[in-house]
Amino acid sequence: MTTTDPDNTSTTSVVGGSRSTGTKATRVIGVAMVVAMGWLVLFGLVLSPADVNQGESVRLLYIHVPTIWIAYLSFVVTAVSSGIYLFTKKHSLGWDRLAGASGEFGVAFVALTLLVGSMWGRLTWGVFWQWDARLTTTALLFVTYIGYLAVRRLGGSHHQRAKRSAVVGLLAVLLIPLVHWSVVIWRSLHQTASVLDTDGDIDMDGTMLFTLFVGVVAFTLLYIWLVLHRTRAMAMEDMLEDRGLDIALAERRAEGVAR
Amino acid sequence: MSALKVAWLIAKKDLQVERRSRIITNQVVPFAGVTMVIFGFALDANTDVLALVAPGLVWLATMFSLLLLVQRTFSVEADDGALDAMRVAGVDARAIFLGKAFGLVIQLLALEVLLLFAAVVLYGETIRLSGAVLLVTTMISATCGLAAVGTLYGGLAAGSKGRETLLPLLTLPAVAPVLIGATRAVESALGTGAAELSDGWQWVSLLTVFAVAFGVGGALAFGPLIDE
């Protein structure tokens, strides 16, 4: 473990010596998020009507759609920040941490999407899972990014971690269109009648559309809030690792002097 | 020395090591054979079902063996720090990647032929002459994709402790398109379940794009991945 990591200074400046990962900005975002979530609950459970065909189960979509949108957003953020880390001269670890934090929440939100989606599927289609192109691609996306998170935990110095995971993060982007392409021809060849023809039968009324919009706003705020905190927490973890050895050495020396 | 020449030397060295150590013939090939037999147990030795799913099982057995072959090809390098030594000696990472991948392609192709033979014997699969060109093209393009992904993540997982378990987690989702594409293409080539011969070619194009994407991407990414 390198104790003279050149990024020691940058980690300190990120955290600013503070013991908390919160700042004024995150508090404002946090409050806005709580308000938006309150709105979502109000509109999603009380004010919006039940669907003609799907009944009350349509309310699950107010979570399902925003979570998958956030998942896609976070994987895009992971890819872009991995690219910035890898291809800029500075190789700033801040971008690596942003990629990692975003990847973590992406995986969490895909898991939530799959969970809510399978509940909705059970209520609407009668089955938890369909081997449909979109579902299969999403499931593979989920596993791919679990692999990405595993690579982040391989150990080594911060820059080793950053380089390795940035490469894997970019390879995942290469993989997604290939997975999607293969699954789309696979299903279009074999599936004669699709149950997923939901575009036609959802008659989106104004309140529903607005509720969905509130959901997307609320979850986007949640994502930003989580990523900001997680990125700072990661900076602290890195700093702790860097300083841990120095502190241990200093303590041993102090013990020696005291004798 | 040009990168391709170096790649060829690395592939030749790998194949020679494997020929002499006999680990592949004594362990990996029997493992693949056992896999084909236990698929039979799992599907209740129902020959109708087995003949129908044989192409998928052949590719599944290939992928499980791929994991073993990749671990094997990198443990040869990592045990004596040979990978680091090659990098220190100034060997181009892209050449190492291509050489390792090419060695894997040869080993996998030999294994696939054996597995197809096992499918004919054990599952009652039939091979038709009209699908031979499609079959061979599919095998080559799919194998190149598998070898590229395997080499890439094998290099990442090589060496340090606890990384061996990472290889399946990274590799299997990545080769999922190959499993889907190669299975459908081989079904078309063999006429399994009344699959049309002409349907197979769109899968070959997918497999080729996959192999090229991961071949090029892997060659570029391999250096940063193995440099520690």
Image (spheres, helix red, strand yellow):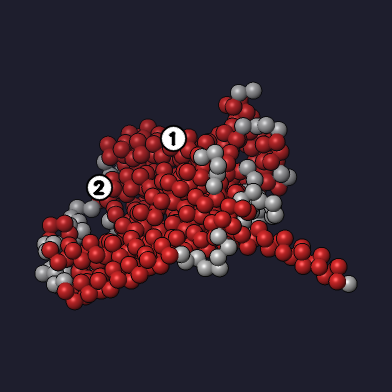
Residue A187 or B4: which is nearer the viewer?
Answer: B4
Q: Secondary structure at mark 1?
A: helix
Q: Chain of mark 2?
A: A
Left or right: A61, with B98 as reference point: left
| Residue under the point 77% across and 63% down | A249
Read off the residue under disc 1: B212
Residue that extends furthest to the top in the rendered view of this protein? B1
Number of residues whose C-alpha sits closer than 10 Å to that of mark 1, classed few (under 14), some (14–19) or many (20 or more)? some
Number of residues whose C-alpha sits closer than 10 Å to that of mark 2, classed few (under 14), some (14–19) or many (20 or more)? few
Left or right: B143, with B29 as reference point: left
x, y percentage for residue A86? 52, 42
Q: Chain of mark 1?
A: B
| Residue under the point 52% across and 52% down | A94
- The image shows residue A188, relative to residue A249, as above or below, that is above
Read off the residue under disc 2: A189
Res B223 → quadrant: top right
- Check if mark 2's residue and mark 1's residue have beta carbons within 8 Å: no
Which amino acid, by three-letter code, is at mark 2? Leu
Which amino acid, by three-letter code, is at mark 1? Val
- The image shows residue B134, relative to residue A12, as above or below, that is above
Q: Secondary structure at mark 2?
A: helix
Residue that extends furthest to the bottom in the rendered view of this protein? A46
| Residue under the point 43% across and 37% down | B213
> Which callout, 2 or 1, points to the residue nearer the camera?
1
Q: Quadrant of the N terminus of chain B?
A: top right
Does residue B12 appear in this view? Answer: no
Q: Quadrant of the C terminus of chain B?
A: top right
